Image: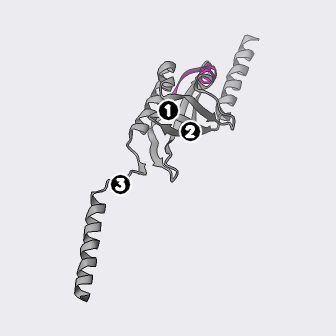
Amino acid sequence: MRKLIIIGLLVGLISSSCNDAGKKEEVRYTQDSEEINTLKAAINDYEKGDWQSLKSHYADTAQIFHNTQKGANIDAVINSHKESLNGLSNYGFLDEDEEFEMVVTDEDHTWVNYWGDWKGTISGSEQEIIIPVHLTARFENGKIVREHGYWDNSAMMMAMQEADTTKTDTIK
């Protein structure tokens, strides 16, 4: 009887193990996903100044927090981008050393994180500025519904002020 119980338990364990092996485990971390490709496309659209295409990657109700605790919609963010890029002769993200990752949280939220360097050239002075940037975007149904962006813009602001001062000194 004892042997029968032990054999029964072993068969149950083996059967259970086989069933678990057949189950597809959900990916909780990756560096290759559709969501990552969407964020890459959004960054590419930003670099090209293709604002309509950039907007297509965001849900209508998306809240975006770039260096602030106050959320904005994508239209306001695009207007802010246009305004802040006015004094630049070119801009974009450097491809080397950039990193993307996607994580699924315990609450089943999908987030994509990006780390990279943004480079811009100040019009007039042609001074180049490189700023480290971190973006994190939450996705639902293939669209960005929430985004946080963090960078220190002070180097660009000082370079633009310096270029304005130089321009003013030249006019005198």
Q: Nearer the viewer, residue 21 or 30?
A: 21
| Earlier residue among tags 2 and 1 | 1
Q: Residue at x 74, y 17 (%)?
A: 169
Q: Look at label 3 and name its amino acid.
A: Glu
Which x, y percent locates residue 20? 31, 62
Residue shown at 31%/56% (left/top)?
Answer: 23
User: Circle 2 sits on which residue?
Assistant: 133
Closer to the chain start, of discs 2 and 3, is 3
Q: Which residue is mark 3?
A: 25
Residue 88: x and y in percent read 59, 21
In the rendered image, which quarter is residue 4 located in? bottom left
* Residue at 61%, 39% in the rendered image: 150
> Looking at the image, do the residues carrying marks 2 and 1 touch, with CB atoms under 8 Å apart?
yes
Which residues fall within the magenta stretch?
A: 79-92
Q: Earlier in the sequence, mark 3 or mark 1?
A: 3
**What amino acid does circle 1 point to?**
Phe
Residue 84 forms part of the magenta stretch = yes
Whether residues under marks 3 and 1 lie with C-beta atoms below 8 angstroms apart, the answer is: no
When the figure is inspected, residue 134 is found, relative to residue 46, above or below; the finding is below
Looking at the image, do the residues carrying marks 2 and 3 touch, with CB atoms under 8 Å apart? no
Q: Secondary structure at mark 2?
A: strand
Tell me the residue that label 1 is attached to.
93
